[in-house]
Amino acid sequence: MKRHVITLAACVLLFGAGTAPAREYTQGTTYVEPRGGVYGTTNPNVNTVGTYGGAAGHYVMDGVALEAEGQGYAVDQQKKTRTVLGEATTNETANATSVAAMARWDFMRTNKGTLFVGGGGGGVFSDKPLPYNGDTQNGMGQADLGGSVALGKDVSLKAAGRFQHMGSFSGNGLDSLGGNVGLKISF
């Protein structure tokens, strides 16, 4: 049932929205996209991750774009410290910035929207260790799956699900899964 709902939503997204033809997925097109997102994590010491920022990209061939992404992060986490009586837990917010390079493939394109996959990596730099027992400078890898709806010839609304890994591949790393939305403006 869930697969049918996802397929139906994708068809509505691509064939039932907007009326303006979109030229924004063709070779030579450049875009900027402010975006923000919210993520849950698998790390028991991190509750939620909020992101805000944007990306700038360029289509190197029809449907294939390379982009540079810059994000700010607010990470709600728990800091644990040893005490004489055991362990104390304190809630804190870590602030961070990231820079990443991404590749994006719009594998299904119509004049009303796209479905796409993307992936890339970069670095995250924070004011406090992420998670609390990690580091303040971490490598990052991420993968997207999403769609966009044309709002006009050069503007589209994008929504994507994202998996993101920060830091080491041990208990000191952070896996997050969530989504982001953006407004893509092409020129």
Image (spheres, grey):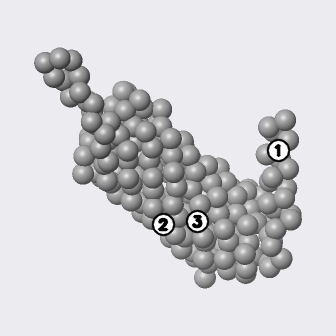
Residue in the foreground of this view, choosing between 94 and 113: 94
Quadrant of the image occupied by residue 116: bottom right
N-terminal-most mark, 3 or 2: 2
Residue in the foreground of this view, choosing between 85 and 105: 85
SS of the residue at dot 2?
Answer: strand
Read off the residue under disc 1.
5
N-terminal-most mark, 3 or 1: 1
Please state if 187 lies on the left or on the right of 69 as rendered. Answer: right
Residue 150 disc label = none
Q: Residue at x 51, y 46 (%)?
A: 39
Q: Residue at x 57, y 74 (%)?
A: 31
Outermost residue, top direction?
85
Position of 161 relative to 149 (above/below): above
Position of 185 relative to 107 (above/below): below
Q: CA distance from mark 1 to mark 2?
A: 30 Å
Quadrant of the image occupied by residue 134: top left
Read off the residue under disc 3.
182
Read off the residue under disc 2.
54
Which residue type does callout 3 highlight? Gly
Query: CB atoms at circles 3 and 2 under 8 Å apart?
Result: yes
Q: Position of residue 23 (x, y in %)?
A: 73, 77
Position of 91 relative to 115 (above/below): above
Q: Position of residue 164 (x, y in %)?
A: 49, 44
Q: Quadrant of the C terminus?
A: bottom right
Q: Is residue 168 visible?
A: no
User: Dot 1, how many residues are within 10 Å of its Cα: few (below 14), some (14-19), or many (20+)?
Assistant: few
Which residue type does callout 1 highlight? Val
Q: Residue at x 21, y 18 (%)?
A: 86
Residue in the foreground of this view, choosing between 20 and 169: 20
